[in-house]
């Protein structure tokens, strides 16, 4: 597994995300790492990230899958194009759509583990599949379609 | 618009959700209201709920759509079956899957507005469509499939 998280390699403008930005002190600060051709992450939920007592909220799961998959897409595009992660302008893939299927209740007590991989890469569209596990149990699985946009559009 | 939020009418066990539970002090505390055959909600994001500065995070959007839609499904099932919202056992619909298409960047400065309605209701499965707006602009649209489960399964 690579030592440096993908999120710690982006340009500062990409470091404020509530789900995974290193500079967002109130955020989840997810850290994703290349491991071969997969991207993996571990996250310890807070107890208050619940849907019901002891069960992880579906919106937190969606946030983790979204951020993890988008980092996978952006990092994979940098690698494919030989760009540095922190090159300016940013590569500029954002989430076009997300689909998540919730398979099992996910405990908040234990860390969750994410695995993502690129399913298809086109110039303007990257499809990433991602699953979230608690221990050995696959609790949710999803697909994120990342869309390339220009840097100017990143800020609305 | 009904005066009392759907989330304020559930049994205590359903009041701790990070996205919409009235008893979760660290949560988003979304409040959803019937308005005719739609369910509506308004939410003011915090600045730190960003993806990029000034732009709302996709995971927060997913959380709002998930919670708003699931409240719609559970409330609609209570109405269809003539059950009180806080009857014990709970009606027990949980999110089976969620699909969201992100259409436009959503500003964090302004409140967002949610509109949901039941698309299809079956005994064990309710499909809800939901869109999120900033002002007049539809920024995201989604579909949530709610699945009925027994009360015992709600707590894992």
Image: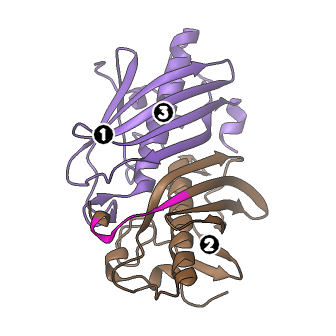
Chain colours: A brown, B purple
Element at label 3:
helix
Q: Which percent across, then down, holds residue A128?
A: 61, 62
Element at label 2:
strand
Q: Nearer the viewer, residue A146 or A142?
A: A146
Residue B55 in the image: above or below residue A24: above
Q: Which mark is residue B80?
A: none
Q: Chain of mark 1?
A: B
Look at mark 3 in the image and give the residue it sits on. B69
Residue bounds of the magenta highlight:
A145-152
Element at label 1:
strand
Q: Which mark is residue A42?
A: 2
Q: Nearer the viewer, residue A120 or A27?
A: A120
Look at mark 1 in the image and give the residue it sits on. B133
| Position of residue A129 in the picture relative to residue A30 (left or right) | right
Choose top left, top right, bottom left or bottom right for residue A92: bottom left
| Position of residue B91 in the picture relative to residue B15 (left or right) | right
Report the mark closest to the observer, 3 or 2: 3
Q: CA distance from mark 3 to mark 2?
A: 28 Å
């Amino acid at each position: 597994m690579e030592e440096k998280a993908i999120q710690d390699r982006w340009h500062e403008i990409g470091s404020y995300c509530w789900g995974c930005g290193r500079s967002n002190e109130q955020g989840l600060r997810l850290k994703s790492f290349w491991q071969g051709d997969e991207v993996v992450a571990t996250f310890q939920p807070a107890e208050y990230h619940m849907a019901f007592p002891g069960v992880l909220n579906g919106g937190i799961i969606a946030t983790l899958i979204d951020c993890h998959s988008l980092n996978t897409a952006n990092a994979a595009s940098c690698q494919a194009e030989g760009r540095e992660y922190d090159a300016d302008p940013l590569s500029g893939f954002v989430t076009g759509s997300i689909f998540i299927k919730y398979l099992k209740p996910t405990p908040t007590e234990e860390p969750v583990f994410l695995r993502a991989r690129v399913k298809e890469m086109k110039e303007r569209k990257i499809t990433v599949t991602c699953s979230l596990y608690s221990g050995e149990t696959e609790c949710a699985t999803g697909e994120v379609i990342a869309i390339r946009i220009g840097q100017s559009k990143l800020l609305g």
